[in-house]
Image (cartoon, rainbow, N blue to C red):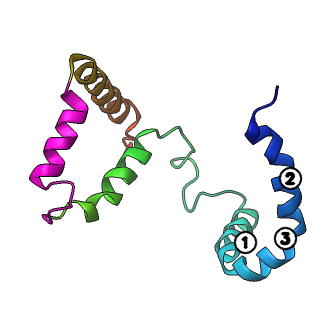
Amino acid sequence: SRGPLLVAFPAFVRGLVRRCPQLLVKYWPLLVPVGGFVAFVVQNGGVVVGDRENHTMVLHLAMPLYLLAFASVPFLSTDRDSLLAPRQLSEFLIQCFGSPLRALASTVAVAIIAGMVHRYSLVHPF
């Protein structure tokens, strides 16, 4: 017994292929940066600009966390619907610490995030 998503996926792919020309005409500007990046990588022989020895690719699990923190700044205003409004803040704290199990889960999540930032934040040798 296949799930509904698995059943619908082939039809989705067929429709995507059938509509590919219309999609390309409509969304070609979104492909310009992708094409530019591919051309850069081919021309440069990799993604590194500058000293390849000191700019190797490594697992950087803290980077999505930095992105999340940076991207959430616009939502931290003092409006009544912002994340820092007293009502929103109290609802957030209740969601995170409203029961012993939620408090434990929130504490574990914060510990994992802190561990990722500590372990995977890159320190340059110079």
Q: Residue at x 82, y 62 (%)?
A: 16
Name the N-terminal-most of marks 2 and 3: 2
Task: Kindly identify which numbered label has been placed on residue 64.
Answer: none
Mark 1 is on which residue type?
Answer: Gly
Camera-nearest residue between 74 and 69? 74
Instruction: Report whether 85 appears left or right of 34.
Output: left
Q: Is residue 31 above or below residue 119?
A: below
- Check disc 3 and report the residue beneath it: 20
The reply to whether the magenta stretch includes residue 84 is yes
Quadrant location, the N terminus: top right
Mark 3 or 1: in front is 3
Mark 2 is on which residue type?
Answer: Ala
Q: Is residue 1 above or below residue 32?
A: above
Task: Kindly identify which numbered label has been placed on residue 35.
Answer: 1
The secondary element bearing badge 1 is classed as helix
The answer to which quarter of the image holds residue 105 is top left
- Check disc 2 and report the residue beneath it: 11
The secondary element bearing badge 3 is classed as helix
Mark 3 is on which residue type?
Answer: Cys
Separation of residues labelled 2 and 3 (CA atoms): 14 Å
Q: Residue at x 80, y 46 (%)?
A: 8
Name the N-terminal-most of marks 2 and 1: 2
Could you tell me if the residues under marks 2 and 3 are in contact, i.e. CB atoms within 8 Å? no
The answer to which quarter of the image holds residue 97 is top left
Return the x and y of residue 26 as percentages of the image width and height. 73, 81
Return the x and y of residue 113 as percentages of the image width and height. 34, 32
The reply to whether the magenta stretch includes residue 94 is yes
Magenta range: 78-98
